[in-house]
Amino acid sequence: MIEGLQHSFPPDTIETMMDDPARARAEIEARRPDILALFQRRRALLAENFGTMVADAWDRAESALCLSLTRLAIRHGRFGQDYHHYHNEEHALEILDRRIERVMRELGIKALTGLDWVALTLFATCHDLRQRELVDSGHPVGSNEAASIAETERILDRCGFDRVRDHELYLALEIMIAGSTFDARPAPMDRSKFNTAEAVTTTGPLAPHLARELDRINPAWRSEPSLDRAIRLALIASDLDTANVGESFVELSDSGARLAGEREMRAGRSLESTDAGPPLLGFLTTGQERYFFELHRFCSDVGERVYGPGKAANAEKVRAISVQLRERFRDREPGSYTGVDVLDAQREMVWQLA
């Protein structure tokens, strides 16, 4: 659908090595059997409410979930050697489990179709598959997202989906993952050092602008009958991806701390060093305020209804913790405190405000 994305990103060594859904499932069973129990509960719920067709789609999707989660955990999570504090399997699971479950609970499972739930679940585990791609300014879609789209389509192929029969699913995932782009601009000088964790404070997600971008890339897109659904799901997916703003203040602050840790890692600064102290403080104060109050907007009615009240409740706490963190370190010289000092102070203040 989005020209140039499908063939620009071939399989990497992790994809080639972990190409068997059964092997991926065995890895999860050995390390995180609770995830398979979650899959079983979700399948039973969808089968009860939507029947065998959706249950059959879930069975294929479950193989895809195992492959995508295992690859993500090997690349950037707890199964591998290149740990990313935020963009790892736990972020995928917080969307798949906690956030989707909350929408189902508060709006009712019939708020969306069974196949919509399947698509959103696959988005959770597939949208961050790649995190180390070189930035390319040739598309509004980020290189990490474009690579994730290409790999997701190969995962679907491998797990029994068909590009003709299941065209709507392929299209929906392409548009949803594209919409999760936060910043596709080229990094200055060295494109390899683009910091994904920092992008959240520079611009908002692409999702609400997808129709405009598609008009620019391919004006004929409006003749595609399934694209309205894909864009609607992309708006919901974007809200699920950024729903931390409307979760508990502890969960919101934890996600901010994880992003901060990943930002410092990608910048080559150890959290234990004094080099990390001032930039981490800025990220958890000015950066978080900018993200929360200026950049974040709910894209869908679903996101607004479920997470809007929580965001409103968090607003004054976000302001308060920024004031307190700045005050704590106001009289400290930049070389006198580390990133760990800032994170420890943040955790202490979060529980006082929660």
Image (spheres, rainbow, N blue to C red):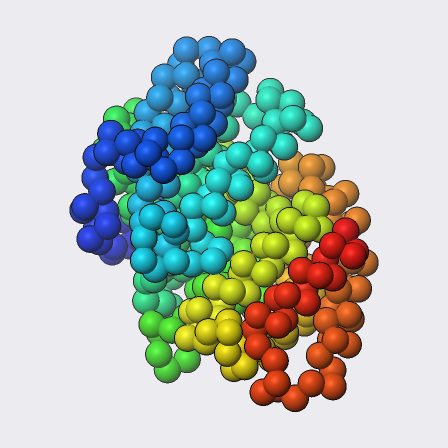
> In the image, 106: left or right of 101?
right
Q: Is residue 269 left or right of residue 331?
A: left
Numbered-mark total:
0
* 272 sits left or right of 146 in the view: right
Residue pictured at 40% horizontal, 30% vertical: 33
Quarter holding the N terminus is top left
Q: Position of residue 49 (x, y in %)?
A: 54, 13
- Residue 70 in which image quadrant: top left
**What residue is drawn where x is 69% and y is 28%?**
106
Q: In the image, is residue 145 above or below residue 20?
A: below
Where residue 43 appears, x then y in whole percent?
Answer: 45, 20
Residue at 61% in and 85% down: 336
Quadrant in which residue 285 is drawn: bottom right
Residue 84, percent from left and from top: 42, 58
Query: 289 or 340, which lies in front?
Result: 340
Residue 308 seen from this side: yes
Question: Viewer-proximal residue, 4 or 110?
Answer: 110
Above or below for 127 versus 336: above
Q: Nearer the viewer, residue 32 or 212?
A: 32
Can residue 199 be seen by looking at this rendering? Answer: no
Query: Residue at horizontal 28%, vertical 31%?
Result: 26
Return the x and y of residue 100 as percentages of the image width and height: 56, 34
